[in-house]
Image (tube, rainbow, N blue to C red):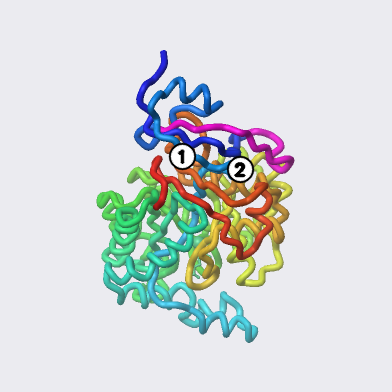
Amino acid sequence: MPATSATRIIANGRVWTAVPGAAGLGAAVSVLPLAIAEQQGRITASGALHDLQQRYPGAALYDAGGRLVTPGFIDCHTHIVHAGNRAAEFERRRAGESYQSIAQSGGGILSTVRATRAASLQQLIDTALPRVDALLAEGVTTLEIKSGYGLDLDPELRMLRAARAIADQRALGVATTYLGAHALPPEHGGDAEGYVERLCKELIPAVAASGLADAFDAYCESVAFTAPQVARIFAAAQAHGLRVKLHADQLSNMHGARLAAQHHALSADHLEYTDEDGVAALARAGTVAVLLPGAFYFLRERQRPPVEALRRAGVPMAVATDCNPGTSPLTSLLTAMNLAAVEFGLGTAECLAGVTCHAARALGLQDAIGTIAPGMWCDLAVWNVEQPAELVNNLGARPLHRRFWHGQPDA
Ligand code: NIG
Ligand code: FE
């Protein structure tokens, strides 16, 4: 039965899209000459232009001019809403101080907490938008934004509102994450158990009820929360209908990957110190491994995430910027891909899947975004490159030709 009213056909593209779960992601990257039909923002079909034009007579044509077309990119781990900056800590680290010791002396996350608590909603939006725009200029069409620099009800809700406002003010999708267990708030005077109790009884129920958070996140680390504490917090988040994610095994092996898997987390992120047991647990649970090479680079880490073990076990790997003022002041997903390739050994197809289908899965959105297939949102990036490897190889290039979000091209 021929359909009649596609609003647009994107023609003359050379299309790359991952087939999630397909073997051999690390091998050759194949690109197909395809046209894509879009109706009311969603992909309805892809195939030969001639066939689509017959099926959708009268559809508007967008000529991709033989360019590479990929799914719109997804940055699935950011702290892009925050106030202040921590360039002075960058200087301290270069002088030899460690991230942990800066954090223990009241800097680190807590210094951004002070600045963020003092900022208005409008200030949070205004300071985040240039960073967001930098990502959009690289083909990002969906962005995850975490709270976690408020650490009390009002400033956490303010951060989440800022994230929602960004989605209203730009052509992109935003997935919000309540990072309630990022650090112990200073007013708790070292009483982590007291804060965990408050999170479970008061803060998580209130944030869940606000409807402002799509997921919950925690930081399991020596400078943050222990595995048993995170387990209690996750149970509360899940009881309030929030899916969970975890900052896991970044600076030491806290068995965070295993913990995330036990809770069927959407993703376990960082993973530098994850061991074979952790990898096996992620594989069993179907939890996505989100690699954050920006934080690895800025902290001059030496321990790499177990990429070969993740690959062998079939754990989907995503790549994200971790854009934050301390450990990853990075607003370039293309750079994150390059770092993932150079530092972690990912192939081009793994990098591309890492910012498309696997990033979508890390947000629980794999049925809506991240691949070019009927029924998915028509979020696309059209690139001025000859081959996909250039997107990973060329550092500092500006290869984006056009971005489509929900079927609409940017001006
Ligand atoms: O993902 N690991 C915890 N959170 C951030 C760091 C945040 C900060 O230092 O402000 C991260 O690296
Ligand atoms: Fe993070």
Direction from residue 345 to residue 4 in the image, left or right: left
Spot occupied by residue 324 in the image (x, y as percentages of width and height)? 48, 67
Q: What element carries label 2?
A: loop
Amino acid found under the numbered disc labelled 2? Pro
Query: Residue 282 location, x and y as percent?
Result: 60, 44
Give residue 41's position: percent from left, percent from top.
38, 37
Q: Is residue 63 above or below residue 142?
A: above
Looking at the image, residue 254 lies above or below residue 352: below
Q: Earlier in the sequence, mark 1 or mark 2?
A: 1
In space, the residues marked 1 and 2 are separated at their CA atoms by 33 Å
Answer few, some or many: residues within 10 Å of disc 1's Cα (few below 14, many 20 plus, some between 14 and 19): some
| Residue placed furthest toward the top | 1
Q: Find the magenta span and give its range.
A: 22-38
The vertical placement of 362 against 336, above or below, is above
The residue under the point 46% across, 25% down is: 53
Q: Name the residue under label 2.
A: 316
Which residue is at the front of the view, 14 or 41? 14
Residue carrying label 1: 62
> Of tags 1 and 2, which is closer to the observer?
1
Nearer the observer, 35 or 99 = 35
Task: Tell whether 269 sits left or right of 210.
Answer: right
* Picture residue at 63% right of the left edge, 53% below the top: 391
Q: In which quarter of the image is residue 119?
A: bottom left
Three-letter code for the amino acid on which mark 1 is drawn: Tyr
Name which quarter of the figure residue 200 lies in: bottom left
